[in-house]
């Protein structure tokens, strides 16, 4: 209870930091982080091709897939031309590790941005009162910049593999005589997620400089000269 009272009494809303690079860039990080994990986590797509037997109407074969892209869990049935039971086939590949890692970095980045924005706007005096706050902020921001580099690169490669595994031209290779590929799945949303990932890398890495200026490690190389007590000012 005492801690809550101290936090409540110490809260003083000040929108001034939003006019500075430190706060403004953090808001951009908050927005682009949401876009990054939202465009990946909510995706659902569909790939399809047609099967045409001699003297019969073409049949459409569809397979729906989505986040977290465990494609081997998505079955589809290929009709048989000899009247036998349709063969059940699965999409190939499991790309959940890179997709979930990317979304996880995005979610934790969003939470950290929210927490630091509250700190910047409501507890700016506490943030600047000691050197510990800016130093911790710098270390965590640098760590997130590295995580965005790793996760975005991994997800970019994972997305390339997802495109190949769900490409209708690839799916019809096992039945080229009777199968015809359809339109490729729409991947614009996933392409945007990779772009947002690398934009976050730029934002978080660039923000390290502005946070660094708040730490005691950043010193003015040319401090202003002070006059000696009782001395006359120079010409």
Image (cartoon, rainbow, N blue to C red):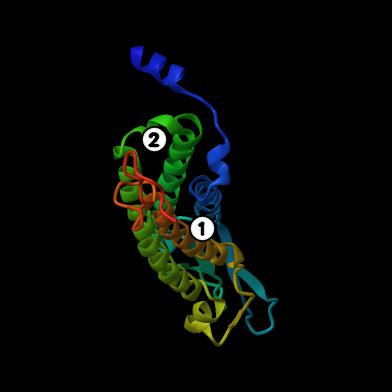
Residue pictured at 34% horizontal, 49% vertical: 138
The N terminus, quarter of image: top left
User: Considering only vertical position in the picture, is 84 above or below 9?
Assistant: below
* Residue 108 in view in this figure: yes
x, y percent for residue 101: 37, 55
Q: Which class describes the residues within 10 Å of circle 2: few (<14), some (14-19), or many (20+)?
A: some
Residue nearer the viewer, 150 or 13: 13
Give the quarter of the image for residue 49.
Answer: bottom right
Looking at the rendered structure, the secondary structure element under dot 1 is strand
Residue nearer the viewer, 109 or 203: 203
**Lower position in the chain sequence, tag 1 or tag 2:** 1
Residue sticking out furthest to the top: 1
Residue pictured at 47% horizontal, 37% vertical: 120
x, y percent for residue 80: 54, 74
Residue sticking out furthest to the bottom: 177
x, y percent for residue 203: 48, 58
Looking at the rendered structure, the secondary structure element under dot 2 is helix
Residue pictured at 50% horizontal, 62% vertical: 199
Q: Which residue is mark 2?
A: 127
Q: Which class describes the residues within 10 Å of circle 1: few (<14), some (14-19), or many (20+)?
A: some
Residue nearer the viewer, 59 or 218: 218
Q: Which residue is mark 1?
A: 66
Callout in the foreground (1, 2): 2
* Left or right for 142, reference 53: left
x, y percent for residue 167: 53, 75
The C terminus, quarter of image: bottom left
* Residue 94 in view in this figure: no
Please give the label number shown on residue 158: none
Is the C-beta separation of discs 1 and 2 under 8 Å?
A: no
Give the quarter of the image for residue 8.
Answer: top left
How far apart in space, not on screen, are marks 1 and 2 (Cα)?
Answer: 42 Å
Residue pictured at 43% horizontal, 72% vertical: 161
């Amino acid at each position: 209870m005492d801690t809550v009272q101290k936090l409540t009494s110490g809260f003083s809303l000040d929108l001034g930091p939003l006019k500075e690079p430190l706060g403004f860039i953090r808001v951009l990080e908050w927005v682009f982080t949401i876009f990054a994990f939202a465009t990946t986590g909510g995706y659902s797509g569909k790939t399809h091709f047609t099967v045409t037997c001699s003297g019969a109407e073409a049949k459409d074969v569809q397979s729906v897939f989505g986040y977290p892209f465990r494609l081997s869990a998505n079955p589809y049935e290929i009709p048989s031309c000899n009247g036998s039971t349709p063969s059940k086939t699965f999409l190939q590949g499991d790309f959940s590790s890179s997709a979930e890692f990317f979304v996880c970095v995005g979610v934790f980045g969003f939470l950290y941005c929210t927490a630091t924005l509250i700190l910047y706007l409501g507890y700016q005096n506490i943030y600047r009162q000691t050197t510990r706050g800016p130093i911790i902020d710098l270390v965590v921001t640098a760590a997130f910049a590295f995580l965005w580099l790793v996760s975005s690169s991994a997800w970019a490669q994972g997305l390339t593999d997802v495109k190949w595994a769900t490409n209708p031209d690839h799916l019809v290779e096992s039945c080229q005589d009777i199968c015809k590929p359809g339109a490729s799945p729409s991947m614009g949303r996933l392409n945007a997620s990779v772009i947002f990932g690398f934009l976050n890398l730029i934002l978080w890495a660039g923000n390290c400089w502005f946070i660094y200026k708040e730490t005691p490690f950043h010193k003015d190389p040319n401090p202003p000269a002070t006059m000696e007590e009782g001395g006359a000012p120079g010409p």
